[in-house]
Amino acid sequence: MAVQKSKPSRAKRGKRRSHDHVIQHALSIDKLSKEIHIRHHITKKGYYKGKKTLLFHLLSK
């Protein structure tokens, strides 16, 4: 069984945890459908920059 030699320092612990923070995504409102969505992502109805995306249109059939 692995046993540590010494207690990790506060700096080492902080460096390990530096990427554990919660990120709040930037939200946008689509021009055409007026839906709120994460920036640079399609809306739930399949719109991106005011246009219906082809990929979503094909998958929804």
Image: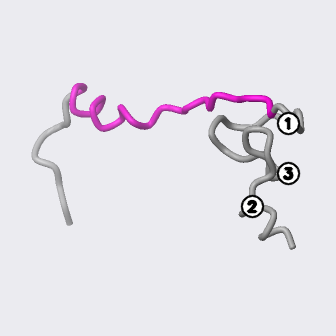
Which is more N-terminal, label 1 or label 2? Answer: 1
Q: Which residue is mark 1?
A: 35
Q: Residues within 10 Å of mark 3 (few under 14, many from 20)?
A: few
Which is more N-terminal, label 1 or label 3? Answer: 1
Amino acid type of the residue tagged 3 in the rendering: Lys
Q: Nearer the viewer, residue 27 or 40?
A: 40
Q: In the drawing, what numbered circle is on residue 2?
A: none
Amino acid type of the residue tagged 1 in the rendering: Glu
Q: Do the CB atoms of the residues marked 2 and 1 lie less than 8 Å apart?
A: no
Q: How many labels, in total?
A: 3
Q: Do the CB atoms of the residues marked 3 and 1 lie less than 8 Å apart?
A: yes
Q: Is residue 20 magenta?
A: yes
Q: Which residues are magenta?
A: 10-30
Q: Nearer the viewer, residue 54 or 61?
A: 54
Q: Quadrant of the N terminus?
A: bottom left
Please tell me in which quadrant of the rendered image residue 53 appears: bottom right
Amino acid type of the residue tagged 2 in the rendering: Leu
Q: Is residue 12 above or below residue 43?
A: above
Q: Is residue 48 above or below residue 34?
A: below
Q: Which residue is mark 2?
A: 54
Q: Quadrant of the C terminus?
A: bottom right
Q: Is residue 32 above or below residue 61?
A: above
Please tell me in which quadrant of the rendered image residue 51 appears: top right
- The nearer-to-camera label among 2 and 1 is 2
Q: CA distance from mark 3 to mark 2?
A: 12 Å
Query: Residue, x 18% and y 37% (percent of image)?
Result: 7
The local secondary structure at tag 3 comes to loop
The local secondary structure at tag 1 comes to loop
Q: Residues within 10 Å of mark 2 (few under 14, many from 20)?
A: few
Look at the image and name its color scheme: one colour
Q: CA distance from mark 2 to mark 1?
A: 18 Å
Q: Which residue is mark 3?
A: 45
